[in-house]
């Protein structure tokens, strides 16, 4: 199957953690999907046995009527039969559950952080590092399970990686300073208490800075012989929670092995389309990366939904007096940075013929 082909019939899929904010985003992203059909919804023991409409406090838009009466089951491979599962589970419980599904022969598309840095687990943004899917062979052989786990990146790391990938290809990133302004939806539901965030900036998000610093090197690295050679990039990250609903804004100052000439970095960013296998998938945006020319863009309110939430917008590309270049990038944290990213990973697997027959 080529990257532009589609299956004869749709794959049945399940969503784990279906009642939460990211689980609901999975459902919105998969509604009417041409390749995948939601047939099972799984959540915690307190939701199991209820209908999805009873168990879920729907947060955005309208709950799909065909799913509202579906009975919620436990996140257990003995209760979930679908060959493909999208995991929106919290990292506090995701690790062992996702492994159980992989041992049971299921393909797990995970939004959780538990397995991202495992040496045999692909940490994938299809436009950035599609070849990293080859780690699945090592994972399945080494762990002796017939299924597999593929992860998407941290939501802020996704935005940073998509901005840095074309620059790394062209100029080789040596060092990067990363400053984030992250939306409250990144904290899940109910998120941050209103009296903590309104009129405020919180300069700490637990575990977030190490994720950025580790994940960028893995995603921008090269894969060979069943392992990833991380990019030799030093990253220093500051992460902040701000009072916006959706959209993570990332400010970057970057030093390169080869310093870009005037206008060269903007040209590289403008023409980047990412890995060819990531184009023409059902969730692929027309442009994975766009460059805003206005001096005050990107802005969360104006640009977060670019490309149906799957496009990262870059702007303010200019020289940096301390390093070489500085720029600003914005992406939708729960679409491109979470559920939409995992759905795109599943589409990439399907396009390469790596999923079981539909």
Image (cartoon, helix red, strand yellow):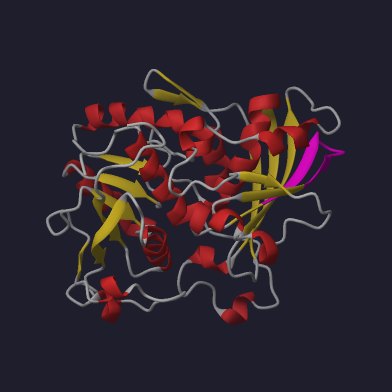
Residue 2, image x and y in percent? 37, 31
Q: Quadrant of the C terminus?
A: top left
Q: Which stretch is magenta?
A: 316-329
| 350 to 68, vertically: above or below | above
Whether residue 207 can be seen here = no
Q: Residue furthest top?
A: 225
Residue 224 magenta: no
Horizontal side of 324 relative to 270 (left or right) equals right
Q: Residue furthest left?
A: 78
Residue 318 magenta: yes
Q: Quadrant of the N terminus?
A: top left
Residue 237, image x and y in percent? 64, 47
Horizontal side of 44 relative to 316 (left or right) equals left
| 1 to 6, vertically: above or below | above
Q: Nearer the viewer, residue 286 or 92?
A: 286
Residue 229, image x and y in percent? 49, 24
Give the overall secondary structure of the magenta segment: strand
Whether residue 83 can be seen here = yes
> Residue at left 14%, top 59%?
79
Residue 186, image x and y in percent? 52, 63
């Amino acid at each position: 199957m080529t990257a532009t082909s589609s299956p004869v019939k749709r794959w049945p899929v399940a969503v784990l953690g279906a009642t939460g904010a990211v689980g609901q985003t999975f459902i919105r992203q998969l509604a009417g999907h041409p390749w995948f059909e939601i047939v099972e919804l799984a959540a915690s023991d307190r939701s199991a046995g209820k209908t999805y409409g009873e168990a879920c406090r729907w947060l955005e838009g309208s709950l799909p009527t065909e799913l509202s009466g579906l009975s919620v089951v436990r996140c257990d491979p003995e209760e979930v039969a679908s060959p493909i599962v999208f995991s929106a589970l919290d990292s506090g419980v995701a690790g062992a559950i996702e492994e159980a599904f992989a041992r049971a022969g299921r393909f797990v598309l995970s939004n959780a952080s538990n397995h991202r840095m495992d040496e045999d687990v692909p940490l994938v943004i299809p436009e950035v590092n599609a070849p990293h899917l080859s780690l699945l062979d090592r994972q399945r052989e080494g762990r002796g399970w017939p299924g597999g786990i593929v992860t998407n990146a941290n939501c802020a790391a996704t935005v940073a990686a998509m901005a840095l990938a074309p620059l790394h290809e062209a100029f080789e990133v040596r060092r990067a300073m990363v400053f984030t302004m992250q939306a409250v939806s990144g904290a899940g539901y109910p998120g941050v208490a209103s009296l903590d965030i309104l009129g405020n900036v919180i300069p700490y998000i637990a575990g977030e800075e190490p994720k950025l610093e580790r994940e960028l090197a893995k995603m921008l690295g090269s894969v060979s012989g069943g392992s990833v050679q991380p990019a030799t990039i030093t990253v220093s990250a500051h992460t902040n929670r701000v009072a916006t609903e959706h959209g993570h804004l990332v400010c970057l100052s970057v030093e390169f092995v080869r310093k870009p000439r005037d206008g060269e970095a903007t040209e590289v960013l403008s023409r980047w389309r990412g890995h060819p296998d990531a184009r023409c998938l059902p969730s692929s945006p027309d442009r994975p990366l766009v460059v805003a020319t206005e001096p005050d863009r990107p802005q969360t309110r104006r640009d977060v939904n670019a490309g149906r939430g799957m496009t990262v917008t870059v702007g303010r590309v200019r020289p940096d007096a301390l390093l070489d270049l500085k720029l600003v990038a914005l992406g939708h944290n729960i679409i491109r940075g979470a559920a939409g990213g995992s759905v795109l990973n599943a589409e990439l697997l399907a396009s390469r013929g790596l999923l079981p027959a539909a």
